[in-house]
Amino acid sequence: MSTKDSLKAAEEFIDFVNESPSPYHAVKNVKNILRNSGFKELKERETWSSKELHPGSKFYVTRNGSSLIGVSIGGKYSPGEGISIVGAHTDSPCLRIKPISKRNKDGFLQVGVETYGGLIAHTWFDRDLSIAGRVYVETDKGTIEPRLIKVDKPLLRIPTLAIHFNRKESNSFEFNKETKMVPIAGQTAWDAYESKSADESVSCCNEDAKFTPEEFSSVKSVIERHGQSLVDLIAKECNSEPSKIEDFELILFDHQKSTIGGLNDEFIFSPRLDNLVSCFCAAKGLCESGSTLSEDSGIRLISLFDHEEIGSQSAQGAFSTFLPDIISRITAVTGTSPDHFQQTISKSFLLSSDMAHGVHPNYSDWYESSNKPQVNGGPVIKINANQRYSTNSPGMVIIKKCAEIAKVPLQLFVVRNDLPCGSTIGPILASKLGIRTLDLGNPQLSMHSIRETGGSYDIEKLCNLFKAYFSHYQTLECKVLCD
């Protein structure tokens, strides 16, 4: 295959990540990938029957608009057979607009933000930032519906202090995240609302003044909490009116687009590689394995969770009931015995796919001497004796067999004994479900930075590995993983 052909997957991924600034957008775009391959949407609140769940059927279900499970049932499926699962997460470290974000200081309009996850905070300074997320809007019918927005314009910036004021910043950059990490959005002198005289405001200390409807409400209106200009902009993006905006969950994102770089196009410079790479490749692998679905006796599933970066303990995180609920409903509808759920779990396997640490040439002494994964060297199997990763030898065997079929090279990673080890959704789901699990993911640099670096040729490798895994798991499971 030519180099140009190998970059097609990377170019498609770049379009995906550029259109996915929030978990809500990521789920929306995964849904589009699945729909284009014939998947139908099911709702958790509706009744499922054999009409929707039968051999050969393909469907997806979402929770909170930020987590998604996609399922395809083999054409020769029989109750109690196993499920080949790829798990990943839709969220990334970022800055989130506070519930009361309005800040005015020294002539500047500012927006209060809250840190989400373990972001490398200093990388967010001096970047062109914009906003994206979910907005709840009152419709003309009186219903409240969510709408996604992505403002395609640099709106915000967190300027650093000039070095002339603090010479120490040339060697180190330390700051208070609450007081110094506050983006500027404009100037009061140029704002149609904030430039009005303070005399026009009503003093809250006037004992004779009557409560306005806004003051009487249990929570102040979004305009009072966030500022008229910001709410006007949000309403315009929603094709609505400011008075119709009930509330929102908005995050900041890097307005600079993801791109292919390097002397030989070997790099992807991008936000949110962790973990939109795995989300994209999981969806593509599931869809591209469709040609073998008719001969499969099992089930294929992708499970993309929100809130991994903050511990997964939410209604839509990996600690939630989302995945066991869906598996339970599938086995209840398709099976005839109450034991089918347990049978299915015992025959199933989870690939927990989260990004891995590629070796950094400027910091190579931070890596275990014999385990230095290379960007573009293929997916990395992550191992930890203390079960921060869930990989063990049976899982190693099954993934090696899949990689041989797909002709995809694999790498190994173990953290140094004198350094802490991160974790993934793998151990969570392994312990929650009792399902056999292996942790792996593509290597990258600058994990949790606003701009990360990955391998452009690794995207195709991970897609092909997942395709082979979905296509051949049932055959390999009987040979390798039977107890």
Image (tube, rainbow, N blue to C red):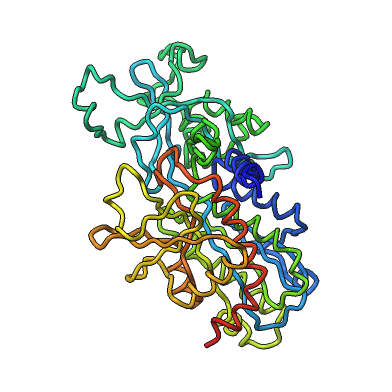
Q: In this view, does 385 lie to the left or right of 254?
A: left
Left or right: where 436 falls relative to 329: left
| Percent of width and height locating residue 397 | 50, 75
Q: Quadrant of residue 76?
A: bottom right
The answer to whether one can see residue 408 in this image is yes
Say which residue appears at 31% left-offset and 54% top-offset.
Answer: 367
In the displayed structure, 341 sits above or below 207; it is: below
Residue 221, can we see it?
A: no
Question: In the image, residue 464 lies at what x, y percent?
Answer: 62, 58
Q: Is residue 198 above or below residue 303?
A: above
- Is residue 14 left or right of 122 when viewed as pictured? right
Which residue occupies the foreground of this view, 242 or 59?
59
Q: Which residue is drawn at 58% across and 69% down?
A: 402
- Say left or right for 175 vs 406: left
Q: Which residue is drawn at 30% across and 58% down?
A: 368
Residue displayed at 71% across by 78% down: 297
Depth check, front residue: 468 or 114: 468
Residue 135, image x, y percentages: 58, 40
